[in-house]
Amino acid sequence: MKKMIIVRDQFGHGIAAVNFAKAFGVKGVIIPKKDNKEDFEAEASKIFDILSFFSGELETVSFENREKAEAEGWDVIADLKAGTLPDEVWKKFAASQLIPQFTEGLPEYKGMAQGSVLFIPQKLVSDGECGVTAAQQSINPQVFSFLKEVNVPLVLGQHFHKINDLSAVQNLAKDFNLYVPGMTENSEVFGIRGVAHEKYYNMYKALGASVGIAGTHTWILLTMFPDTPQIILYNKKGVEHWDAIAEAYRKNGKKITAIGFDEETNLAELAETIEEAL
C-alpha cells in the first residue's frame, strides 16, 4: 500500500479520494495537475479550502516536492477513470465515513421539508473523464413523472448556471413542485456549481433519500451520510463500477441501489424500475 492517496480536485472524485485515504489509514495529499508553481499553489490552496471541511488529515505539498509525493502516492481516481480499480477496494471505502470539521454558521434550509428526496434528473456539465458526456449521463425528466403522484417533497440537487439555465430550472421546479436551494432562501447557494460543498451540509443532513444521476452529491451522501437511501442512475458506458459500489454499501447494511442505462434503454421500463426501487 502506498504512503498516501493523491487528491487532484475539489469535486466528487476529490471527496472520494479523501474517503479512500481515511479508509486505508493514510494521508490525503493534494497534488493538482498544474505545470507551474503559481498555478499549482493557487489550485492546491483552493482544493484544500474546500475539502478540508471533510477531513482534518488533508495535506498539501510544495511544488518542488510534488514529483516525490506522486511517486509515493496512489492516484486512486486515475485508476478508477482508467477502469483498473479493483472492485474489492469499495468494501473498505463503504466502511469509512467522513466527519465534518465544523457545522456552525452553515446555511439552514428552513423552507425545505424534513425527509425530502434529492432529485437529480440530468447532468448539465461533465469533465468527460469518465467515458461519457453530460448528455449521455442525463435522462429526460419525464421518466420521473411518477414522482408527481407520490406525496414526497422533492429537492433539486442538479448543478446549473444561475442565469443561462434559470428558465429551465423554474419550469422544472414548477412541473415537479421542487424546492430549489437558493431560490427562495439562502440565495448564495443558488446554482450549486462553484459553491462550497459545506454550504449544503444541512440540506443533505435533512434528506430522507436521493434519486437521480450520479454526481458530486452522490459522493457526498455516500461518504458523509451513508445511511441516506440512494437510487444512483448511471450510464453503463461510464468507467465507474456503480454496481460494485452499491453492493459494497449494501453489504455494510446501507440502502444503496444502482441502476444502469444507455441509449438503447426503454425509458418506460426504466421508469418502472426506478419506481419499484423507491
Image (spheres, rainbow, N blue to C red):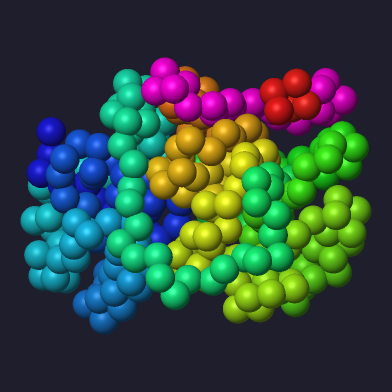
Give x and y (percent) for residue 33. 31, 62
Quarter holding residue 77: top left
Q: Is residue 87 above or below residue 38?
A: above
Give x and y (percent) for residue 203. 58, 58
- Residue at the far bottom in the pictured view: 38
Give x and y (percent) for residue 227. 48, 35
Residue nearest the viewer, comparing 198 with 89: 198
Q: Is residue 234 above or below residue 190?
A: above
Give the side of residue 157 with respect to residue 34, left or right: right
Looking at the rendering, the stretch of residues picked out in magenta corresponds to 250-272
Q: Is residue 40 above or below residue 242?
A: below
The residue sitting at 29% across, 74% down in the picture is 45
Give x and y (percent) for residue 36. 25, 75
The residue sitting at 52% across, 23% down in the picture is 243
The residue sitting at 23% across, 43% down in the picture is 22
Quadrant in the picture for the N terminus:
top left
Give the side of residue 72 with respect to residue 53, left or right: left
Quadrant in the picture for the C terminus:
top right
